[in-house]
Every structure is written in structure tokens, then in C-alpha cells.
Image (cartoon, helix red, strand yellow):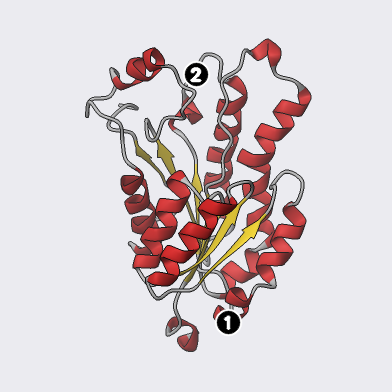
Amino acid sequence: MAMLSKKRKLVLITGSAKRLGAEMALSFARLDYDVIIHFNNSLEEAKSVVKKIENMGCKAIMIRANLNDELKNFIETVKNSELIKNRGGLDLLINSASKYEKMDFENVTEELWDEMQGINTKAPFFLTQGLIDEIRNVNGSIINMVDTSYNRPWKYYTNYCSSKASLYNMTLSLSHELAPEIRVNGIAPGAIMFPDWIEEKDKQEILDQIPMIREGTAEEIAATAVFLAEGPEYITGQIISVDGGLNL
């Protein structure tokens, strides 16, 4: 274990070619982490993030996978990667890949349900299970990207909210089951990086409920992830809301 501690730490972040995932990848590289970038469709963005990390003097690889259809192959590719073998384990798994969709309850099909739950709930569960030995080898930790919706109703987002409520409870349950070797925490972002398809009136309605009177930033989410990964080792089973006070 002493030899491992001298090596650069390693983080795997799903959905890290763009948005919050990309910002977290760059933030951990600034702390001298090597990074495994996961992406599905955003090849050029993934290449850009890898190049930025390499310019910082760290190593980065990118692995493409549809987490609904190719999860097992993705896990095996990660486990057999040079970065995992060189490190002897995985210091940090961040389940950041997420699907977000507004839809009438009556229009949600079984296929849409499976796709939402697959990305937001099933993938984090089985990624953790599949990489558990690699994480345990270095007393690593896990961060799940939850959402402030885990305990509040959102009209037209029943499918999404139910998936994040499941991820919330999974995070708390795993924090008990995997302790003391592995810490498991979550981050619940609020109004941060609205999707392009959200209407301005809906966006303003959300912002009007935030005491901080502004949208949050990707940098603030990344800083929270760094705190959970590098901060006190006595912190586990916590969901930190980064929402400007929206949940108060």
C-alpha cells in the first residue's frame, strides 16, 4: 500500500466529455490525477478533454460506451486498461453520466423507462459492483451524481425523478455495505448548466426559487467532488446539495 501511495491517483468519470463531467475531469487532473474519460457520442469533445489533461502532465485515456447496451464490455475495458494496471486500482469512481428528460407520465414507454433507469441507476450500480476490487485495492471512494429532485416532486419529470431517488438510496445503502474500506457519497446539483431545450420561462421559474439568485457553475460541482475525494476520510453516506439554497 505504501508503494501505491507514491503513484499518481486515478479517477474514472462517466459522461466526462462535456459539461459537469468534463469540468470534474480537468479539476482532478489539476490535482495530479490520471483520468479515464468515458463518453458515448461526444468523440471530439472527449479528445479535447484528454488533450487538456495531457498538457497538464497527467495521463488520460478515453473509452466509448453506451452504458445501457455495452456496460459489461465497458467494465472489462476499464479493468484491463493500462492506467488501472499501472496504478493497481482505482482511487475514485464518479458516476456522472445522466439522462434528463421532460415528459408527460402518460407518454413514458417501457423503453424510455428502461433507458432512463439504465443510465441513471443501473449503470452506477453495476459499475460499482464490477470495479469493486479495483476500488478496494487502494481504499478508493465513489461519488454519485444525484439531483435535488430525489426528494421533491417535479411535474413532467416522474421518470427522471424516480431514477435519481433510486440513486440517492443506493448511495446511502452502499455507504453502509462497503464501509470501512470504501467511502460512498453523492452530490445533488441544483440549477446548474440548464439543457438547451429548457424554455426561458421554466428556467426563470426555477431561478426565482433560489436564495442565491443565480445559476450554479460547473466549477462549484467540481470543487465539491474534490472535497469529497480529498477531504476528511470520515465522511461517507452524505449527499451534498449544491443548489444555492433551493432545498431549504
Q: Residue furthest front?
A: 44
Question: Observer-nearest residue: 40 or 191?
Answer: 40
Q: Amino acid at mark 1?
A: Asn
The quarter in which the C terminus is drawn is top left
Picture coordinates of residue 22 (x, y %)?
45, 52
Residue pointed to by mark 1: 86
The answer to whether 97 is drawn above or below residue 27 in the figure is: above
The answer to whether 112 is drawn above or below residue 122 in the figure is: above
Q: Secondary structure at mark 2?
A: loop
Residue shown at the point (36%, 58%) measured from the top left: 226
Residue shown at the point (47%, 58%) measured from the top left: 49
Q: CA distance from mark 2 to mark 1?
A: 45 Å
Tally of marks: 2
Q: Which image quadrant is residue 214 in?
A: top left
| Front: mark 2 or 1 | 1
Q: Secondary structure at mark 1?
A: helix
Q: Is residue 194 left or right of residue 70?
A: left
Residue pointed to by mark 2: 153
Q: Amino acid at mark 2?
A: Pro
